Amino acid sequence: MQSVSKFVVCPKCNEQTLSEIIISGNTAEDTNLRNMVFSDNIFRWKCKKCGFSSKYQHPFLYNDISRKFMVYYIPQVERLRVVDNKLEAEFAELSDIKKRVVPDINAMKEKIVILERGINDLALEMTKLAVSEIVSKETGHTVYSGYFTDMNEEENTISFQFFVGSDKRSYIQSTRLEVYRHSVEIVKKKFANDEKQRGFLNIGRQWAKNAFDTYRGSR
């Protein structure tokens, strides 16, 4: 794993101390990397002055070369595409690798699971958006966020966990796999070039909204 030294101000004692921050890791070299990400240990920070411990959110690059994907976590990133010239040069020979950028830690975990399973994340985001609109109508509340939970070939379902309403309560919703497969066909016909863009793509809710608007406008 690669780390850098950075001064961090403790939110409890306001003391500024020099800390080692992990900024990237490769699953081929760091066999415990996935567990560290999913347990949030990558982001654990402890003040050297008062001992206060908390989650310190900072940019982090997750690299899984064996499965040919990279997930770049940049807190609250809004851009739909992020180009890191240094990384592009370093991995120039890996033209077929999927590169994604995400705005929060839960989205990073979700994206890792999706890409590990070989699921088309563009189609999945379109499916998730369609299902979230159904959930919003059924509950009468705003859907604030949603995450992929499972794809079951035997039961012919794809499932999501949404957080709805002002209290952001959990709401589980499934739909038939045909909905996802239809989204895959749409992606292949209309958005194949999106995968060819240079840089890290933010394939999330905003991308799905833009994709639906484009698709509906072309019908």
Image (spheres, grey):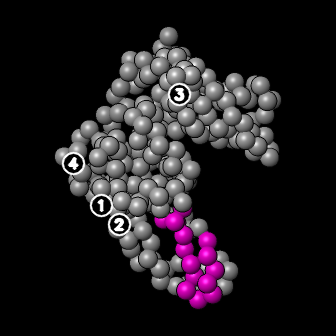
Horizontal side of 218 relative to 195 (left or right) equals: right
* Residue at which label 4 appears: 92
Query: Which element type, helix, strand or loop, lies under badge 1?
Result: loop
**In the displayed structure, would residue 61 be above or below residue 199?**
below
* Residue at which label 2 appears: 1
The percent coordinates of residue 128 (x first, y second) are 58, 30
The percent coordinates of residue 203 (x first, y second) are 47, 38
* Residue at which label 3 appears: 152
Determine crowd level at label 4: few under 14, some 14-19, many 20+ residues with C-alpha closer than 10 A.
few
What's the distance in space between the residues labelled 1 and 3, CA to CA? 31 Å
Determine crowd level at label 1: few under 14, some 14-19, many 20+ residues with C-alpha closer than 10 A.
few
Q: Is residue 52 magenta?
A: yes
* Residue at which label 1 appears: 29
For badge 3, the amino acid type reads Asn
What's the distance in space between the residues labelled 2 and 4, CA to CA? 20 Å
Q: Is residue 14 magenta?
A: no
Q: Which residues are magenta?
A: 40-54
Query: Which element type, helix, strand or loop, lies under badge 3?
Result: strand
**N-terminal label among 4 and 1:** 1
The percent coordinates of residue 49 (x first, y second) are 59, 89
**In the displayed structure, would residue 46 be above or below residue 56?**
below
